Amino acid sequence: QKEVEQDPGPLSVPEGAIVSLNCTYSNSAFQYFMWYRQYSRKGPELLMYTYSSGNKEDGRFTAQVDKSSKYISLFIRDSQPSDSATYLCAMRSLYNFNKFYFGSGTKLNVKP
Amino acid sequence: DTEVTQTPKHLVMGMTNKKSLKCEQHMGHRAMYWYKQKAKKPPELMFVYSYEKLSINESVPSRFSPECPNSSLLNLHLHALQPEDSALYLCASSQGQYRDGQPQHFGDGTRLSIL
């Protein structure tokens, strides 16, 4: 079993829709959670970073962590064609700051 | 533009060549990483340097040789690569082990093609 599971998609939505992207994990030591956006032929770009459970909002993006269910989400409101990219979740444990575990990435296509 | 700079952006080399990839960051980060990413796959960790010392080596073949000359620079020396080594090579940095947990920041990568 992979430590981080993420549906690869592709996920196709109309412009203006609310998008929900999700990851599940198995290691209860994971405490730090990140979402990255990666455009084709570019490096991953950090979108959101959260510690432990709860919600964090930044503009159109909301990150949600539910540690009891080992489940994290990224919501994108009012999605735009420019949001079309691959979204990667990543996480790190309390015990090893230098190792990050990635989901496989979800490819999102926002249609005009 | 990212705060982690990688050069070159593209590299084509033969299997007998020797080349180096370079990475630079000026964010004061003390951990630096090399990842390999194949198409439609997540980044795959290769090496981690923490405070200029190699702290993680994910059983990478010896034809890849990392070097961290100082806290801002990271190199990846390549020699006798195989066609399956063609990929996007990403450099990343983070605050480091002894600082409160902070995320990684990535460069845009070097796209490597082995002929």
Image: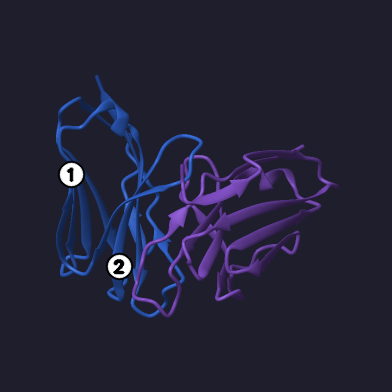
On the image, numbered disc 2 is attached to which residue? A32
Tell me the quarter of the picture where residue A111 sits.
top left
Left or right position of B6 against A79: right
Shown colour of chain B = purple
Q: Nearer the viewer, residue A60 or A108?
A: A60
The percent coordinates of residue A74 (x first, y second) are 22, 49
Q: Which mark is residue A59?
A: 1
The percent coordinates of residue A52 (x first, y second) are 21, 70
Left or right position of B70 against A65: right
How many C-alpha atoms fall within 10 Å of the one at disc 2: few (<14), some, or many (≥20)? many
Q: Which mark is residue B96?
A: none
The structure residue drawn at horizontal position 24% and vertical position 29%, both measured from the top left corner, is: A80
Amino acid type shown at disc 1:
Gly
Q: Secondary structure at mark 2?
A: strand
Q: Is residue B27 above or below residue A15?
A: below
User: To which chain does the residue with label 1 belong?
Assistant: A
The structure residue drawn at horizontal position 36% and vertical position 67%, both measured from the top left corner, is: B102
The answer to whether one can see residue A7 in this image is: yes
Which quadrant: the C terminus of chain B? top right
Distance between the Cα atoms at labels 2 and 1?
21 Å
Q: Secondary structure at mark 1?
A: loop
Tell me the quarter of the picture where residue A10 sits.
top left
The structure residue drawn at horizontal position 52% and vertical position 44%, both measured from the top left corner, is: B108
Shown colour of chain A = blue
User: To which chain does the residue with label 2 belong?
Assistant: A
The structure residue drawn at horizontal position 50% and vertical position 71%, both measured from the top left corner, is: B30
How many C-alpha atoms fall within 10 Å of the one at disc 1: few (<14), some, or many (≥20)? few
